[in-house]
Structures are given as structure tokens and as C-alpha cells.
């Protein structure tokens, strides 16, 4: 058990702090970000940051050679504090965001995409447990994400194709971003795909956008929530009514054998675990069987949704981009 807790804390799993912050009031939250300032972005192209991390077995691809962007929204790192929403001047929190989710998740896209990752006043973890204040705090956080995306479109994108990527709280927000700004707008034609992982997605959320049905489908979304094979979760927070298997890139119920696994990355970025993961979709979430250190003993594999399939996602991004340009 001790090894599990150590592993979790070194990634980005969060726990409830002892005392609930004060009742949510937007006037009491930290100052809004100015996205014209580079300091309010965890990752930007042509800049050395955590999203540029690559394993030793790969060579860096210059951002000047990438024709697609990724707009990445990170998960909850804000565990405790005096406000419902995070302060973007909190250097300790920013360091955790950069060194955990941005380094281990956003980096998966850097072989094919210029990476944009805005800092946003994310909700404290307790927002997901407080029915009165939580939704207000999360809606407040979403406004930063929306503002950052609009700034990205207006000032950085220059008409380029893009990918939306997110995890956990990030997906809570990207679901709404897809609905409001992409689903029924012309931006949909420029979206290669959306990797919206680790939070519930309902197919009824969107009028036009659909689940990706193959490894080369474009203009669609991919989602899954990972659990140990045989484990039945008692909550549907992390999964909805659709799941895509990241080893087959379909929603088929047929299991995918370990031989399909391109490779996982855990804490050591230079340690590639090939053919260690097999998967199958069960009741719209992902059952995972693995022989990896530490995580093989976990029932809820939420913290490793990206790590378990790091090389699989990386290769799939390349395939979808190639298919997008063939169209």
C-alpha cells in the first residue's frame, strides 16, 4: 500500500483536504489570467518547457516541421487552499502541473504537434464533492479555458488544423468547449480529433461530433476511463455511455492482446514497457490487465490513463494527422 501512495503522489492524484474552503464567490477568486503573457501558458511552441520531454529512444522534431497544433487542458492538481479556484501565481502548484500532467501527458503529442497548454484557475478537488459550490467553481474555471482557447484561435492558430486533448478536470471542461465552440461551428472542419480522456462523455452532448470509429477517423472524439480487469466501479464520474479502446481505436468489445500494446511510460521517461498491457471494453469503460510495476495492483487506473498507452497515443496521433491531410 505504501508503494501505491508514493506512486500516486509522484504523479498527480489528489486527495481531499481536511477543511472546506469558504463558500464560492467569484469576487474572492484569484485574478484572471492575461493570455497574451507567456507566463500564463504552461506550454508554448518554440519554447523549452515540460511538454517538450521525449524518451531517449526518440529524436526531437522541430516545432517548425509540425503542421498541427494540440490544445491541452490538464487535470486537477489543486488539492487545498484558501480559494475555490487556483492562483496562477502559485509557483509550487505551477511546478507540479508542469512536472506531472504536462510532462507525462501533453508530451505524448510533441512528435506531431505544436503544444499549447494554458494555465487556468482550476477548481479545487473538493469542487467535485460539493453540490452547491462545486458547479459554480467549475463553471468559473471553464471560463478561463474558453478564454484561452479563443486567444489561441485568434493569435496563435493562424488557420492550422488542431487537436483537443485533456484529462480528468481538463476533460470536464473540454466537453463543454467542444459543445460550445466546435460542434456546430466552422472550427469543426479544422479539428483533427479530440482525445478527451478520464471523465464521462455522453454521445447526446453533441449535435454533429461523433465518437471516432477507427484509428484514422478524424473530426471525432476519443475517450476512455481505465480500471483493473474484473473491477466494477461504484461511480460513473469517469465514464459515460461511450468508450474507445486505445489499443484498437474502436469501440469493439473484442479484447486487445498485449502484443497490440506499443508501450507504456511510468515515472522513468526512458523506460519503455512494450507488450505489457491488454484491454477490453466493459460497460462503457476500459478494463486493463497489465504486468507493470505498482499500477498492476491498482483497481482504479485513472492516474495512468495516458501513461499506460503513451506510445499507442503517440503513434495514433500521427496516423490521424496523415488521414486528415489526405482528406
Image (cartoon, rainbow, N blue to C red):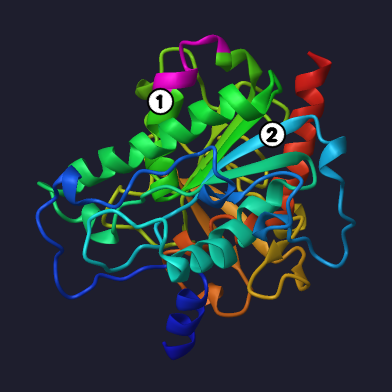
Q: Position of residue 247 (x, y in %)?
A: 67, 47
Q: Is residue 306 covered in magenta?
A: no
Residue topped by disc 1: 203
Residue 21, relative to residue 201: is it above or below?
below
Q: Is residue 3 left or right of residue 173?
A: right
Residue drawn 42% across and 68% down? 13
- Res. 166 in view: yes
**Gap in Å between the C-alphas at discs 1 and 2?**
25 Å
Tell me the crowding category of disc 2: few under 14, some 14 to 19, or many 20 or more residues within 10 angstroms, Cα based.
many
Q: Quadrant of residue 105?
A: bottom right
Dominant SS of magenta comes to: helix
Q: Position of residue 85 (x, y in %)?
A: 28, 53
Disc nearer the start of the sequence (1/2): 2
Q: Nearer the viewer, mark 1 or mark 2?
A: 2
Residue drawn 50% across and 55% down? 287
Q: Is residue 27 left or right of residue 106?
A: left
The stretch in magenta equals: 179-186
Residue topped by disc 2: 69
- Res. 213 in view: no
Residue drawn 46% across and 26% down? 178
Q: Position of residue 134 (x, y in %)?
A: 19, 48
Q: Position of residue 264 (x, y in %)?
A: 69, 63
Quarter in which the C terminus is drawn: top right
**Total label count?**
2
Amino acid at each position: 500500500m505504501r508503494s501505491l501512495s508514493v506512486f500516486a503522489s509522484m504523479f498527480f492524484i489528489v486527495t481531499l483536504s481536511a477543511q472546506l474552503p469558504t463558500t464560492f464567490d467569484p469576487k474572492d477568486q484569484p485574478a484572471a489570467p492575461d493570455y497574451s503573457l507567456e507566463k500564463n501558458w504552461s506550454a508554448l511552441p518554440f519554447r523549452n518547457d515540460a511538454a517538450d520531454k521525449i524518451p531517449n529512444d526518440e529524436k526531437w522534431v522541430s516545432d517548425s516541421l509540425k503542421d498541427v497544433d494540440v490544445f491541452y487542458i490538464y487535470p486537477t492538481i489543486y488539492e487545498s487552499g484558501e480559494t475555490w479556484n487556483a492562483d496562477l501565481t502559485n509557483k509550487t502548484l505551477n511546478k507540479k502541473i508542469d512536472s506531472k500532467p504536462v510532462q507525462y501527458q501533453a508530451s505524448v503529442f510533441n512528435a506531431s504537434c505544436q503544444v499549447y497548454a494554458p494555465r487556468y484557475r482550476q477548481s479545487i478537488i473538493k469542487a467535485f464533492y460539493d453540490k452547491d459550490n462545486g458547479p459554480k467553481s467549475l463553471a468559473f474555471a471553464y471560463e478561463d479555458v474558453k478564454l484561452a482557447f479563443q486567444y489561441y484561435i485568434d493569435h496563435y492558430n493562424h488557420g492550422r488544423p488542431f487537436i483537443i486533448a485533456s484529462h480528468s478536470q481538463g476533460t470536464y471542461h473540454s466537453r463543454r468547449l467542444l459543445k460550445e465552440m466546435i460542434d456546430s461551428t466552422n472550427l469543426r472542419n479544422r479539428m483533427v480529433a479530440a482525445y478527451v480522456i478520464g471523465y464521462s462523455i455522453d454521445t447526446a452532448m453533441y449535435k454533429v461530433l461523433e465518437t471516432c470509429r477507427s484509428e484514422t477517423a478524424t473530426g471525432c472524439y476519443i475517450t476512455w476511463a481505465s480500471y483493473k480487469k474484473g473491477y466494477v466501479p461504484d461511480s460513473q464520474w469517469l465514464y459515460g455511455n461511450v468508450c474507445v479502446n486505445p489499443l484498437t481505436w474502436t469501440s469493439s468489445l473484442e479484447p486487445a492482446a498485449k502484443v497490440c500494446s506499443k508501450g507504456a511510460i511510468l515515472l522513468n521517461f526512458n523506460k519503455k514497457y512494450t507488450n505489457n498491457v491488454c484491454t477490453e471494453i466493459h460497460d462503457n469503460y476500459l478494463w486493463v490487465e497489465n504486468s507493470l510495476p505498482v499500477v498492476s495492483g491498482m483497481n482504479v487506473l485513472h492516474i495512468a490513463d495516458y501513461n499506460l498507452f503513451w506510445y499507442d497515443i503517440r503513434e495514433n496521433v500521427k496516423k490521424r494527422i496523415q488521414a486528415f491531410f489526405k482528406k
